[in-house]
Image: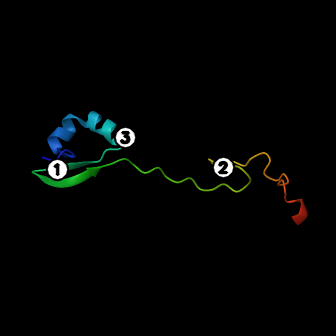
């Protein structure tokens, strides 16, 4: 049996341990009589919809001097 394959009985017996490993990023295939019947893998995080308005989205950052004049560009303004 391959390392990332677990039988149905073993899955039932060690479910908590397998779930902890899945949460850590591992993928397992559940087998029945040597044939893969299911896959256990981490769930992809759902993307959050963008929120309208300035700086309301997660991870959004704007420097405090964003609109400050750029040194050396005085001739172009």
Q: What whole-number distance in Å separates the C-alpha atoms at marks 2 and 3?
A: 27 Å
Q: Quadrant of the C terminus?
A: bottom right
Residue projecting furthest to the left: 33
Residue occupying image coordinates x 84% and y 51%: 68
Left or right: residue 24 compared with residue 36: right
Residue wearing tag 3 = 23
Q: Secondary structure at mark 1?
A: strand
In three-dimensional space, the C-alpha distance between marks 1 and 3, rounded to whole angstroms, equals: 20 Å
Q: Residues within 10 Å of mark 2 (few under 14, many from 20)?
A: few
Of residue 3 and residue 28, the one placed in the foreground of this image is 3
Instruction: Where is residue 17? Give x, y as percent.
Output: 27, 34
The circle on residue 31 is 1
In this rendering, the label closer to the viewer, 1 or 3: 3
CA gap, disc 1 to disc 2?
A: 44 Å
Give the mark nearer the N terminus: 1 vs 3. 3
Query: Is residue 55 visible from the viewing direction of this image?
Result: yes
Q: Secondary structure at mark 2?
A: loop
Dot 3 alpha-carbon crowd within 10 angstroms: few under 14, some 14 to 19, many 20 or more:
some
Examine the image and state in which quarter residue 8 appears.
Answer: top left
Viewer-nearest of discs 1 and 2: 2
Q: Is residue 77 visible?
A: no
- Which residue is under mark 2? 60
Relative horizontal placement of residue 3, taking residue 73 as reference (left or right): left
Residue 59, position in %: x, y? 62, 47
């Amino acid at each position: 049996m391959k390392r990332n394959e677990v039988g149905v009985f073993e899955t039932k017996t060690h479910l908590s341990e397998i779930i902890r490993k899945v949460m850590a990023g591992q993928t397992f295939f559940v087998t029945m009589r040597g044939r893969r019947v299911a896959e256990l893998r981490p769930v992809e995080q759902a993307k959050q919809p963008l929120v309208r308005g300035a700086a309301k989205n997660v991870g959004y950052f704007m420097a405090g001097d964003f609109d400050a004049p750029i040194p050396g560009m005085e001739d172009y303004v």
